[in-house]
Image (cartoon, helix red, strand yellow):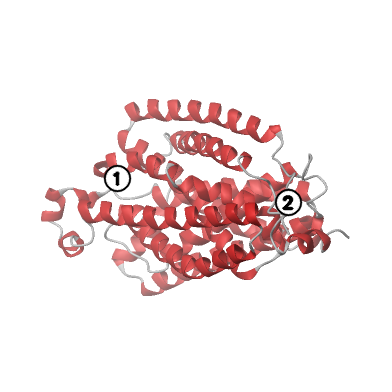
Amino acid sequence: MIRNNTYTAPPEVGYLGSRALIVGVVGLIALGIGFFFDKDQFFRAYLVGFIYWLGAALGSLGFLMIQYLTGGSWGVVTRRIFEAAARTVFPLGLILFIPIVLGMGSLYEWTHADKVAVDPILQHKQPYLNVTFFLIRAAVYFLVWWLLSSMLSRLSKAHDDTGDHGKRQRMADLSGPGVLAYGLTMTFAAFDWVMSLDPHWYSTIYGLMVIAGQGINAISLAIIIAVNLAKREPMEHVYRPSHFHDLGKLLFALVMVWAYFSYSQLVIIWAANLPEEITWYLRRWSGKWSLVGWAVLLFHFAVPFTILLSRDLKRHARRLIWVAGLMMFMRMLDLVFLVAPEPGSPSRLSTAWMYVAATLGIGGVWLWVFSQNLRSRSLLPVNDPQFEDALAAHSH
């Protein structure tokens, strides 16, 4: 049976996109001005903004596939949010990657032949860290992400139009290998785009840290969007405290997973106490950067962990949204902590405003595209076999 779908996005979604685009244009103009003050800082700031919003898209893609595999009412009521975010990977994500390619010389030491010639470590890593192979790998990453997001999107639309539950099974079948492909490609993308900023340092758990951060970004964004949709029709009578409780539990779990990966990396490197490894932390825990490190420790883990222990808070949408907002801000600060204090980068924080400008600038454009995606389809997959259970189970 094909159900009629009347869950169209309210006009406020379009207004959000328009306002976000204005903010984005202002942010990009400010960032462009920063280029003339410090070109290297400009590209590092842009890299933070790019990784941040790409993370929101890819984290959403990951959640989408996990929900197809595991079920759960939380995924039914947030699926359109995750789908809209995942569809920004291509072509927007690829377009936003172009400045990274143009700024490779400023970002990556291993792109300079003169430095490679006198550095045995760079020579050893040259078969992997070279411009041609870097671009080939990036093309593969975007191809995999585009295929996953577009195939799931087409199957979802066909399921909406026909009510054929075979399409739902095909999405689940695709999501199994899709989760594996996402994990592998994002791990190597994290190595290429962020970890190779310091080619003398490496961590095998680095990709998992980035993936956990993307999950936090995606679920926090979903909470913020869902809370705002719940204030008005047609979603006002759909979202229930139990839905937000589920989302809050997912955020709580990811905060712990991120902390576990981060702590594991620290303990292993600190225990080995090797000069080529420990210097990565010494740069981040000395001078003014230590203040950023303490902020990440407290507000990316300790504070949200403590707050999210409360069952009542997770069921209270207007309180949960503040925690989600905090986590989105801390995700930016954590990425700054990972990207900024690298060899050859400015040790001062006087141009830190560029990181904010880049995140707002890219984010404004990203949110505008996201809002267009969200408006293009119904806010609920009414033909999903779990649809009635998802609403009925949380109606009490």
Q: Position of residue 346 (x, y in %)?
A: 34, 41
Residue 64 lies, with reference to residue 347, above or below; the image says: below
Quarter that holds the N terminus: bottom right
Badge 1 element: helix
Badge 2 element: helix
Label 2, residues with CA under 10 Å away: few <14, some 14-19, many ≥20: many
Residue at the far right in the pictured view: 396
Q: Position of residue 387 (x, y in %)?
A: 74, 60
Residue 41 lies, with reference to residue 326, above or below; the image says: above
Is tag 2's residue or tag 1's residue first in the polypeptide sequence?
1
Q: Residue at x 15, y 54 (%)?
A: 116
Q: Residue at x 53, y 38 (%)?
A: 369
Amino acid at dot 2:
Leu
Visible residue check, residue 294:
no
- Between residue 148 and residue 253, name the one nearer to us: 148
Q: Identify the residue position indicated by label 1 in the image.
A: 107
Q: Residue at x 67, y 53 (%)?
A: 78
Visible residue check, residue 15:
yes
Q: Position of residue 271 (x, y in %)?
A: 41, 74
Q: Identify the residue position indicated by label 2 in the image.
A: 320
Q: Position of residue 218 (x, y in %)?
A: 58, 53
- Viewed as shown, does residue 4 lie left or right of 341? right
